[in-house]
């Protein structure tokens, strides 16, 4: 923990939190504070434990650099970034505020990044909150949470869902401290994408998160929620890679990068466990929130149907071509044959007649399109839509959208793919990996489609955070109106009607550990 003396340039913003004073920086008119611990480092005796409140410090702590990311898998080089960062203060928050000070009472947007619950760090350039805070008049908060085995492995002797517990601890920090940064603790909106969207859904269902936020935005919700038995079996396989048991006693002293590498190895070979782990294994999904009976007693869809979110303003949405980027990363874009498409339909479409329903609804679709449709629907689109349906059915307020703008980057082949919403919502069109989807961005002020669309989406997100209305009608189960974000935005009935009908009777239930030999999804 680096703490400076009380002196320093007065032009740099300073605030006092419950744990001590902080000195940040000022960037493009926004006060920025990075790397603020919200919990003690979860190492040593605290490894695999629930987050513990951070101890205070004396003097003024410098808050100008992101904290080190948590240990994580090797996708997109994230493991290397994690290992390069010194220190074990994995659990830190970052704050951007256009008006720091206890009297500003600005709306607060708290971001939860995605990464399949396996990777993710708040210090990536695409999550810089400066533009969103400055243009929207909001306080933006990002934070790290444990991922992979550290955060979601079902380890004997450890609480389940440690990554979710980290998220709840970060929201408690916001409640207790955001006023010092100009935020209003009574106007907190949590928003997240992909696994971050799944986390938002989980927080809606978690009783221990009650009262920590009044609004929520769930973007491209990852719909996988595991049973304790499934999660424990996967964790046991990861520990076995190291010749160990999945217990705190066996794993506590294992170097974090070795544990992450073991998780990667199991993920890479997950398909061979499809007979036990089911559909997640066939998509190499090895970590997810666990419906453990404590943090989560039911799935988010059941919780919302039971009225858990009735008093929370909710906004949900997905992109049109969610799966296309993932297909490209698998090297299959334009290469899906009839056999592969038929297997995907057979495995992931709902019910015994789901495969036929897709073919009947899309009689002219080739194997690539059918493959994309069913996988988009299974992991992202229908879990997201069903959140809206459950909220509306329970009498809660919900707004829905679909991003349909085809990104021009990567030769325009990826359409409105998974992750495209991230640079558009943050306004970071020229930095970070998701910005590659947009391609070359004309200079600011030129009125490019990307800039105009980004401004429109940022305005909707910040308006929702401010007063619960993003600028279009709420969703109901009669008209099903949604906002389409495109070069020419419009409000229309939910356009993916064929998929909605195919999935309307499907329940996104807890994913179980299967008896050997059972067909995944059946």
Image: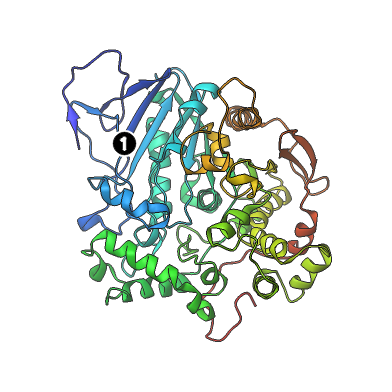
Quadrant (top left, top right, bottom left, bottom right) of the C terminus: bottom right
Image coordinates of residue 424 in percent, x first then y, are: 58, 35
Question: Residue placed farthest to the top in the image?
Answer: 10
> Horizontally, is 37 left or right of 144 in the view?
left
Residue 85 versus residue 462: which sits nearer the camera?
85
Image coordinates of residue 20 in percent, x first then y, are: 25, 29
> Horizontally, is 204 left or right of 65 in the view?
right
Question: Residue placed farthest to the bottom in the image?
Answer: 517
- Residue 123 figure quarter: top left
What SS does tag 1 mark? strand
- Reading the image, the residue beneath label 1 is 35
Q: Residue at x 77, y 74 (%)?
A: 353
- Residue 63 figure quarter: top left
Residue 277 versus residue 81: which sits nearer the camera?
81
Image coordinates of residue 322 in percent, x first then y, are: 63, 53
Q: Is residue 187 above or below residue 218?
A: above
Quadrant (top left, top right, bottom left, bottom right) of the N terminus: top left
Image coordinates of residue 342 in percent, x first then y, are: 70, 74
Q: Residues within 10 Å of mark 1 (few under 14, many from 20)?
A: many
**Number of marks present in the image shown:** 1
Residue 419 versus residue 237: which sits nearer the camera?
419
Question: Residue placed farthest to the left in the image?
Answer: 5
Q: Residue at x 62, y 57 (%)?
A: 323
- Residue 45 figure quarter: bottom left
Colouring mode (rainbow / by chain / secondary structure / one colour)? rainbow
Question: Can residue 58 be seen from the camera position used here?
Answer: no
């Amino acid at each position: 923990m680096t703490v400076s003396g009380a002196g320093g340039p007065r032009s740099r913003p300073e605030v006092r939190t419950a744990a001590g004073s902080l000195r940040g920086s000022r960037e493009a008119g926004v006060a920025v504070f990075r790397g603020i611990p919200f919990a003690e480092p979860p190492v040593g005796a605290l490894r695999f434990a629930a987050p513990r409140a951070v101890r205070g410090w004396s003097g003024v702590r410098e808050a100008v650099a992101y904290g080190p990311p948590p240990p994580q898998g090797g996708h997109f080089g994230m493991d290397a970034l994690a290992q390069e960062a010194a220190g074990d203060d994995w659990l830190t928050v970052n704050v951007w505020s256009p008006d720091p000070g206890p009297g500003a009472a600005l709306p607060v947007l708290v971001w939860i990044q995605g990464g399949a619950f396996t990777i993710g760090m708040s210090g990536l350039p695409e999550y810089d909150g400066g533009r969103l805070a400055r243009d929207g008049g909001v306080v933006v908060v990002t934070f790290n949470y444990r991922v992979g085995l550290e955060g979601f492995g079902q380890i004997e002797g450890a609480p389940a869902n440690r990554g979710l517990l980290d998220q709840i601890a970060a929201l408690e920090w916001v409640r207790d401290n955001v006023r010092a940064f100009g935020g209003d603790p009574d106007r907190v909106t949590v928003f997240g994408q992909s696994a971050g969207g799944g986390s938002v859904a989980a927080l809606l269902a978690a009783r221990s998160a009650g009262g920590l936020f009044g609004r929520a935005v769930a973007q491209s919700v990852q719909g996988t929620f595991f049973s304790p038995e499934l999660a424990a079996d996967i964790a046991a396989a990861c520990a076995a890679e190291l010749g160990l048991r999945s217990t705190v006693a066996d794993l506590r002293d294992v170097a974090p990068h070795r544990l992450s590498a073991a998780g990667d190895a199991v993920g890479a070979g997950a398909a061979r466990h499809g007979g036990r782990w089911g559909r997640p294994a066939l998509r190499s999904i090895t970590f997810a929130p666990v419906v453990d009976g404590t943090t989560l007693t039911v799935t988010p869809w059941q919780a919302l149907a039971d009225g858990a979110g009735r008093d929370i303003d909710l906004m949900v949405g997905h992109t049109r071509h969610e799966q296309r980027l993932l297909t490209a990363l698998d090297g299959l874009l334009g290469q899906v044959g009839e056999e592969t498409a038929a297997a995907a339909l057979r495995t992931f479409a709902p019910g015994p007649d789901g495969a036929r329903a897709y073919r009947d609804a899309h009689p002219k679709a080739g194997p690539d399109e059918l493959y994309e449709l069913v996988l988009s629907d299974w992991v992202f689109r229908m879990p997201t839509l069903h959140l809206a349906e459950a909220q509306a059915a329970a009498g809660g307020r919900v707004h829905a959208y679909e991003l349909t703008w085809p990104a021009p980057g990567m030769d325009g082949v990826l359409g409105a793919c998974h992750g495209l919403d991230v640079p558009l919502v943050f306004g970071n069109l020229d930095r970070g990996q998701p910005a590659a989807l947009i391609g070359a961005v004309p200079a600011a002020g030129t009125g490019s489609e990307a800039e105009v669309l980004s401004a429109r989406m940022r305005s909707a997100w910040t308006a929702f955070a401010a007063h619960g209305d993003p600028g279009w009608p709420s969703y109901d189960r009669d008209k099903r109106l949604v906002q389409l974000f495109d070069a020419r935005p419009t409000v229309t009935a939910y356009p993916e009607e064929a998929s909605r009908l195919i999935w309307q009777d499907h329940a996104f239930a807890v994913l179980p550990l299967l008896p050997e030999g059972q067909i995944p999804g059946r």
